[in-house]
Image (tube, rainbow, N blue to C red):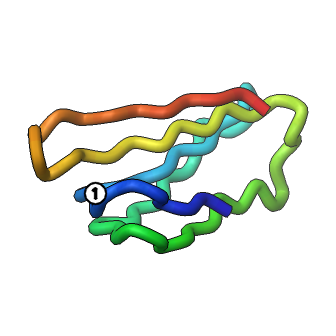
Amino acid sequence: MVTNLGATVQFARAFARTSHDPGRTLMWGHVKHGDQMEVCLCDTDVDDVVVTLAWFRPEDGQEYIWRFVV
């Protein structure tokens, strides 16, 4: 589960990929403060997965990315 603890963000999305799977994209759109989204790693080898969360902040229009490896 991912929880937005900050301000509302725009065009939020999540990418999950492995060395055997080119990946899938979850399009979340606008995410308000307190909203929770799920990144399902079902049917994925969780020893080999890269998850990337990306979003735009309305205040500055910049894209922000948070990437981590499980």
Secondary structure at numbered mark 1: strand
Residue 21, image quadrant = top right
Q: Quadrant of the C terminus?
A: top right
- Residue at 23% in and 46% down: 56
**Percent x, y of residue 16:** 61, 43
The reply, left or right, for residue 17 in relation to residue 47 is left
The residue under label 1 is 9
- Residue at 32% in and 46% down: 55
Identify whether 8 is placed above or below 47. Answer: below
**Percent x, y of residue 24:** 55, 51
Identify whether 57 is placed above or below 48. Answer: below
Report the amino acid beneath label 1: Val
Identify whether 31 is placed above or below 66. Answer: below
The reply, left or right, for residue 56 in relation to residue 19 is left
Crowding near the residue tagged with mark 1, few <14, some 14–19, many ≥20 C-alpha atoms within 10 Å: many
Identify whether 49 is placed above or below 56. Answer: above
The reply, left or right, for residue 61 in relation to residue 36 is left
The reply, left or right, for residue 3 in relation to residue 45 is left
- Residue at 39% in and 66% down: 28
Q: Quadrant of the N terminus?
A: bottom right
**Percent x, y of residue 67:** 55, 29
- Residue at 11% in and 41% down: 61
Using the image as rendered, state which of residue 45 and residue 11 is in the foreground.
11
Using the image as rendered, state which of residue 44 and residue 51 is in the foreground.
51
What is the total number of numbered labels drawn onto the structure image?
Answer: 1
